[in-house]
Amino acid sequence: MADREDCGAKETRETGLLDPWCLSPDLPPQHTGRLSHLAEKHGLLPDTQFGGRPGRTTEQALLVLSNAIDRAWYKHKVVTLVAFDLKGAFNGVHRTSLDACLRAKRIPTVARKWIASFMSDRYANIGFDDFRTETAPLANAGLAQGSPLLSILFAFFNADLVDQPVTFHGGASAFIDDYFHWRVGRSAEENLAKL
């Protein structure tokens, strides 16, 4: 087993959960579970961030929005909603920015280094029919499509955008790479000025 200091034992009180990172750096599904467990146990992600997290379903995401609309209409208010899909969201995750997000949430150094290595030294080529380009390095590969780490890492990356309180005046929520922000007021014009 790696030295406990190498595993970040002095950095956070949660480190004990991640000691297995030192044992098996090539097991993404297990690491996904450890990272998800750490995030949920210690409340590291916003409550209104849904999808790719245990117990955070599509139905719950819709209920947050539906409840906000019902409350507003009950008080004869107008709800104005901006919704968008973050195009190329996973490819656009920059390794340095993700590391800063993980560090801010006190994820241990050993885990952050493993994640950085997971996002490094990636190559691609394009092929169709009998044609294939030469393999070339990707300067910023982002998160690997199909990886079990994709959803949880994007949740950490996107957390600051989503981390806004849901009140009688509005709120924000997300379902993986779909983002919603709404305001409640007397008119759509008033809401738009505040969005």
Image (cartoon, helix red, strand yellow):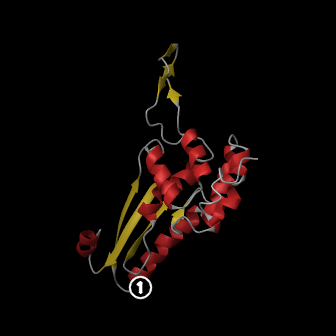
The x, y position of residue 62, in whole percent, is 51, 67
Q: Quadrant of residue 16?
A: bottom right
The x, y position of residue 152, in whole percent, is 58, 54
Looking at the picture, tell me which residue is in the foreground, 137 or 172. Answer: 137
Q: Furthest-bottom residue in view?
A: 75
Q: Is residue 16 left or right of residue 165?
A: right
Secondary element at image label 1 = helix
Residue plotted at (41% across, 85% down): 74
The x, y position of residue 41, in whole percent, is 65, 67
Determine if residue 122 is in view. Answer: yes
Q: What quarter of the picture does the C terminus occupy?
A: bottom left
Looking at the picture, tell me which residue is in the foreground, 89 or 121. Answer: 121
Q: Furthest-top residue in view?
A: 130
Determine if residue 55 is in view. Answer: no
Residue type, label 1 = Tyr
Q: Is residue 41 left or right of residue 78?
A: right
Q: Quadrant of residue 144?
A: top right
Q: How many marks?
A: 1
Residue plotted at (73% across, 51% down): 20
Looking at the picture, tell me which residue is in the foreground, 194 or 184. Answer: 194
Rendered view: 183 above or below 128 = below
**Mark 1 — residue?**
74
The x, y position of residue 24, in whole percent, is 72, 44
Rendered view: 115 above or below 189 = above
Rendered view: 181 above or below 103 = below
Residue plotted at (68% across, 42% down): 25
Disc 1 packing (10 Å; few <14; some 14–19; many ≥20): few
Q: Is residue 73 left or right of residue 113?
A: left
Residue plotted at (64% across, 66% down): 13
